[in-house]
Amino acid sequence: MRPLTGADFPDLFANCSKREAAAIPPPDLDAVEWAEIDFLAWRNPRTPQRAYVAVPHGAGVIGLVFRMAANRNTAGAMRSTMCELCHTVHSSGGVTLFTANKAGVAGRRGDSVGCYMCTDLDCSRYIRGVKRPKRIQPPSTLTVDERRDRLRTKLDGLVGMVMAG
């Protein structure tokens, strides 16, 4: 992913108002390891149920605002779930439903899109093997490049669903 600067943020977010976008705190961009990520994702420590994702899309980058569902897994620690984006399998609590309002009129009506993603939003690092989940993973027949392509395809689809307001 190409490095972003603070100047990129005012017009980045597609599924919220300009006032809401102006209130989104950017992450520490100097601490981002740009070569290790396919998309930038962060959460605001003051509102941990909110997540922000900046995705390369077309010739630019689109930002999406997500709400994180409360983790209501009462099945115990034996339950495992797979992230829809990177296909990493996590133990209880490692995957969460994130919902994003659609862009435009549909979003103002309350229409939204949901996706089960890694709770820590570290999909890029999981597919590269830089970060490993606690749970043993099923064998993969895909190379890292193929997993990155799949992740990018999933992200493009997610952006498309949000933008199809």
Image (cartoon, rainbow, N blue to C red):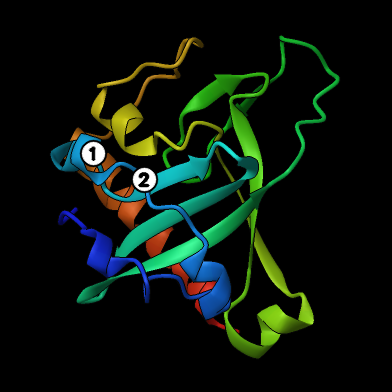
x, y percent for residue 39: 32, 50
Q: Nearer the viewer, residue 162 or 139?
A: 162
Residue kind at label 2, given as amino acid type: Pro
Q: Which residue is mark 2?
A: 27
One can see residue 144 in this view: yes
Is 6 situated above or below 118?
below
Label total for image: 2
x, y percent for residue 159: 46, 68
Which quadrant is home to the C terminus?
A: bottom right
Q: Considering the numbered disc 2 on the image, is that residue within a helix, a strand or a loop?
A: loop
Q: Which residue is mark 1?
A: 32
x, y percent for residue 29: 25, 45
Q: Quadrant of residue 128?
A: top left
Residue kind at label 1, given as amino acid type: Val
Residue at 71% over, 17% down = 79
Answer left or right for 153 relative to 69: left
Is 55 situated above or below 69?
below
Is the Cβ of the residue at disc 1 closer than 8 Å to that at disc 2? Answer: yes
Is 52 situated above or below 30?
below
x, y percent for residue 145: 18, 41
